[in-house]
Image (spheres, helix red, strand yellow):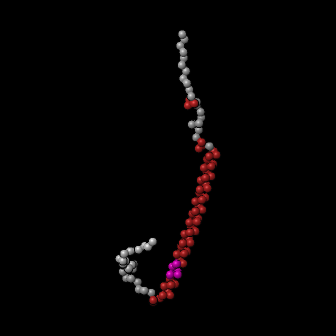
Amino acid sequence: MAAILKRKVRGLKHIRTLSGRYDGATMPSKIYMKLSCLEQEKLRLEGELEKIAHRVEDIEARSQEIEAEKAALLQILGENAPPADPAGDAPRPAPRSRTGGIKLRY
């Protein structure tokens, strides 16, 4: 009798493809898409910087207005202004009374 040759059974796993060999990130369309996304993000950030700069200018202007108004009020008081504390300490709050705290009724 002749010897029966055994064949190796090959399945779907053994089919050779190019799927794992090509990196899709090197496609020109994907590169252009990435560039356009980066440009859009850059424009958005530049817009945010402009808004922040305007906000800082507004805050500085308001601070100057406050100082001018404060100076005008102090000038109106003149000699009626209370004397400055020589120690430089901030005024202390009144001591809390111990009358039992907050009482809630339902």
- Please say whether residue 27 is visible from this viewpoint: yes
Q: Position of residue 25 (x, y in %)?
A: 59, 44
The correct choice, above or below, for 47 with respect to 3 in the image is below
Give the dominant element type of the magenta stretch: helix, strand or loop.
helix
Q: How many marks?
A: 0
**Left or right, 68 with reference to 93:** right
Q: Residue at x 63, y 45 (%)?
A: 28
Q: Per the image, is 61 magenta?
A: no
Locate residue 61: give its quadrant: bottom right
Residue at image location 39% in from the left, 78% down from the top: 93
Q: For the C terminus, which image quadrant?
A: bottom left
Where residue 92 sits, quadrant-wise, is bottom left
Is residue 92 visible to us here? no
In the image, residue 80 lies at what x, y percent? 45, 89
Residue at the extreme left:
98
- The one nearer the camera, 3 or 21, is 3
Image quadrant in which the N terminus is located: top right
Q: Is residue 67 magenta?
A: yes
Q: Nearer the viewer, residue 99 or 54?
A: 99
- The residue drawn where x is 38% and y is 74% is 101
Residue 88 image position (x, y, % from top left): 38, 79
The outermost residue toward the front is 106
Q: Is residue 45 left or right of residue 98?
A: right
Q: Is residue 15 above or below residue 44?
A: above
> Which portion, as a residue range, is magenta?
66-70
The image shows residue 75, relative to residue 105, as above or below, that is below
